[in-house]
Image (spheres, rainbow, N blue to C red):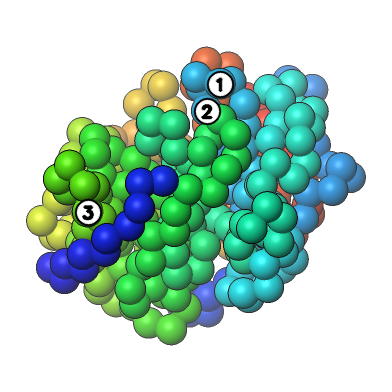
């Protein structure tokens, strides 16, 4: 495990063969059939939305926008939108690259710790005040080329690097000591993880789905891992845990959302979803929040 100590102030798509499986899957429900029970937000200025994060305490949805279809371009045109739970825009550019001394190139996955919003951006983890949007710090991720998703555990931030130029990795980010020395570590870097993408931490166990494959991985805190299931289609993205205990994740190849029980059984719960990226989850309303990357829209779908 590689440890990187960083003193900080307090403050697209990958190619590759996709694995297919014989896992059982239902046909699912067409997304368009369920719109009346959720909502669709489009034609409001979203630009290549990649991730949705629900802050249950504030009861708002944050949406990261790349600002264009290039996920690795350092063009400083990314922004974060703030939505109301009814699917209306509270503020289109709550945080924006090039405004208020903010650098934001291609923001993707988001997570919350205390009053901080963590946002991946190619090779750094950017930190903003979740109440005001003020930029607090940037945390470099040495070796990262496609920082993607975030999950926040107890005192540890987990970040996937999908690896535009290599195998990809999972990082841990934590503070140590009263001076808040930042410790960045590579938990695991392995080509057999097939370009890590969506990640979810649950009681010191990580669940991860890769963009370059179709497996669902369980990753332990010592960096060891195993496959616990295989989806029928690949190019997997956002990963959330539903309140009924299932894991839900998207597949770009399948244009769908899968839900999987912890014994590995899975089925499609929604189909007909073009470019479904890093989903969020509103636990109170039991809604899956889907950013449709190439359609510049976000849809909220009731869990099935």
Seen from the viewer's position, the closer of residues 252 and 60 is 60
Residue 77 x %, y %? 72, 64
- Secondary structure of the residue carrying tag 3 is strand
Residue 110 drawn above or below residue 21: above
The residue at the far right in this view is 43
**Which residue in the protein does label 2 denote?**
55
Separation of residues labelled 3 and 2 (CA atoms)? 27 Å
Residue 181 - label? 3
* Left or right of 215 on screen, residue 284: right
- Secondary structure of the residue carrying tag 1 is loop
Is the residue under label 1 in contact with that under label 2 (CB below 8 Å)?
Answer: yes
Residue 187 x %, y %? 20, 61
- The number of discs equals 3
Residue 58 - label? 1
- Which class describes the residues within 10 Å of circle 1: few (<14), some (14-19), or many (20+)? few
* Left or right of 262 on screen, residue 119: right
Separation of residues labelled 3 and 1 (CA atoms)? 29 Å
Q: Quadrant of residue 264?
A: top left
Residue 215 x %, y %? 35, 58
Q: Earlier in the sequence, mark 3 or mark 1?
A: 1
- Which class describes the residues within 10 Å of circle 3: few (<14), some (14-19), or many (20+)? some
* Left or right of 124 on screen, residue 36: right
Seen from the viewer's position, the closer of residues 120 and 227 is 120
Q: Earlier in the sequence, mark 3 or mark 2?
A: 2
Residue 44 drawn above or below residue 83: below
- Secondary structure of the residue carrying tag 2 is strand
Seen from the viewer's position, the closer of residues 240 and 140 is 140
Q: Quadrant of residue 304?
A: top right
């Amino acid at each position: 495990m590689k440890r990187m100590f960083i003193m900080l102030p307090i403050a697209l798509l990958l190619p590759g063969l996709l694995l297919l499986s014989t896992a059982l899957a239902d046909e699912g429900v067409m997304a368009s059939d369920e719109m009346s029970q959720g909502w669709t937000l489009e034609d409001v200025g979203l630009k290549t939305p990649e991730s949705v994060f629900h802050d249950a305490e504030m009861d708002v949805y944050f949406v990261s926008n790349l600002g264009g279809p290039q996920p690795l371009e350092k063009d400083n045109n990314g922004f974060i939108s703030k939505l109301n739970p009814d699917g209306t825009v509270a503020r289109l550019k709550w945080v924006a690259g090039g405004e208020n001394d903010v650098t934001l190139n291609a923001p993707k996955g988001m997570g919350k710790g205390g009053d901080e919003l963590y946002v991946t951006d190619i090779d750094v983890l950017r930190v903003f005040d979740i109440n005001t949007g003020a930029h607090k710090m940037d945390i470099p991720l040495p070796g990262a080329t496609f920082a993607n998703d975030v999950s926040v555990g107890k005192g540890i931030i987990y970040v996937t690097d999908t690896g535009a130029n290599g195998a990809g990795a999972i990082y841990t980010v934590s503070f140590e000591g009263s001076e808040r020395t930042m410790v960045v570590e590579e938990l695991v870097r392995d080509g057999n993880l097939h370009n890590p993408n969506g990640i979810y931490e649950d009681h010191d166990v990580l669940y991860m789905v890769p963009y370059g494959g179709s497996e669902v991985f369980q990753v332990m805190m010592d960096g060891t891992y195993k496959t616990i299931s295989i989806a029928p289609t690949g190019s997997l993205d956002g990963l959330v845990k539903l309140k009924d205990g299932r894991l839900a994740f998207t597949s770009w190849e399948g244009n769908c959302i899968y839900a999987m029980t912890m014994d590995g059984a899975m089925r499609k719960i929604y189909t007909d979803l073009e470019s479904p990226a890093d989903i969020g989850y509103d636990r109170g309303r039991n809604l899956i929040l889907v950013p449709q990357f190439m359609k510049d829209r976000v849809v909220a779908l009731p869990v099935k």
